[in-house]
Image (spheres, rainbow, N blue to C red):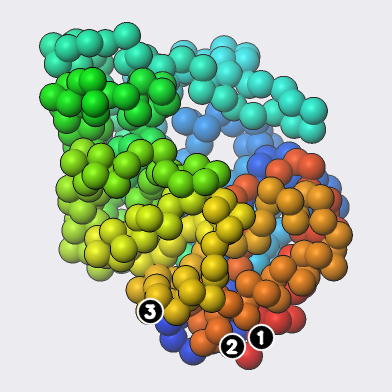
Amino acid sequence: MDHRERVLAAIRHKPLDRLPTDMWATSEVKERLFDYFQIEQAEGVAVQKDQQATLAIPGGIRATLELYDRLGIDGLFRIKAPYIGPPLRVDEEYWEDEWGIGHRRVKYATGIYNERTHFPLAELETIADLEAYRWPDPDWYDYDALQDLITQCGDRTVECGLEATFPYHNFLRGLETSLMDPFLRPEFTHHLVQRIADFFLEYSRRCFEVAAGYFDLTLVAGDYGQQTGLLLRPDTFAGFYRDLMQRAIDLAQSYDLIVFHHDDGDIRQLLPTWASLGMDVLNPIQWRCGNWDLATLKAEYGEQFCFHGGVDNQQTLPFGTPQDVRDEVKWLIENLASDGTGFIVAPCHNLQSNTPVENILALYEAAHEYGTF
């Protein structure tokens, strides 16, 4: 099997030669791995601002493909249509994306995170205020560039298109305000989330129209979970977000695309909903958030979902030993791939800058050792 065949077989619950692997990592981790393997990076790519990148791949596609080959990673590559709209504000430490959301580089002990610091709709109060705002336009992207970007990914699986209404409600209003909106301003909130979802639907439709047949997956993002439980009640999700998410999934399925669902935290209460909506891949399986029973998860949802992620980055990867990592990967495979398929081994979110290289190596060595059938 090549890399793409292996990933697609796992998603479709077909027999495998070995379980596929993937990696999410911060730019500091990628750069450390490039140095470790002495891989030359593409000039300038690693410092490119998020909203202007066309491949979500720090270091460049060639360097990343070489890194994946060295680590034995199959990989899922996420691309987006290049932004060609009106000029954006970009200062040395602060920039705004096409939504008007402000980002600032914040230094921590072991690295830098691009934190959202400006929420442009935070003070708006009426539907008229929303209508007066300058919303991003699907015309601001170069969809014709997608086929070439996909070709650069070689025999890897590619993901394109996006539905992220709830996260962008948070980003545009601020988290606390966005969580109160459905209760304090229901009509306003319905109008707001409809505007967000309409943009993502049309952006994705144009990606699908131009490049359908060249890629396999699309991303439907949620982030409804927290360390224990949900950020919102299930009935709030049903009343404000569910139909918009279903609409996006229906569009993807009309183009025969696989739906990759990203949802951080303890989202177990919503698993029956995700199954009914037609999700195909469930990521990132942050089992320490609420202490999941993974054998039960596989028994109840293993036919519906391919699981992606699972390797803990709260404790095991940053603070454990290489043997701890190996033991956890073995345990995850025994539970989430008990039938020999339906699991893509990966960290349960971005590898953080305090993760030892030795633990990263142990992750992928163990995935190959225990995931080969």
Disc 3 residue crowd, few under 14, some 14–19, many 20+, Cα 10 Å: some
Q: Quadrant of residue 312?
A: bottom right
Disc 1 residue crowd, few under 14, some 14–19, many 20+, Cα 10 Å: few
**Taking the image as drawn, is residue 296 in sight?**
yes
Q: Quadrant of residue 252?
A: bottom left
Q: Earlier in the sequence, mark 1 or mark 3?
A: 3
Identify the residue at horizontal 36%, vertical 61% (top origin): 271
Which residue is the site of mark 3?
303
**Taking the image as drawn, is residue 264 in sight?**
no
Which residue is the site of mark 1?
372
The location of residue 97, given as percent across then percent down, is: 43, 23
Q: Earlier in the sequence, mark 2 or mark 1?
A: 2
The location of residue 85, given as percent across then percent down, is: 33, 25
Query: For the residue marked with disc 3, what is the amino acid?
Result: Glu
From the viewer's perspective, tell me whether residue 210 is left or right of residue 42: left
State the SS at label 1.
loop
Q: Which of marks 2 and 3 is in front?
A: 3
Q: Tag on residue 38?
A: none
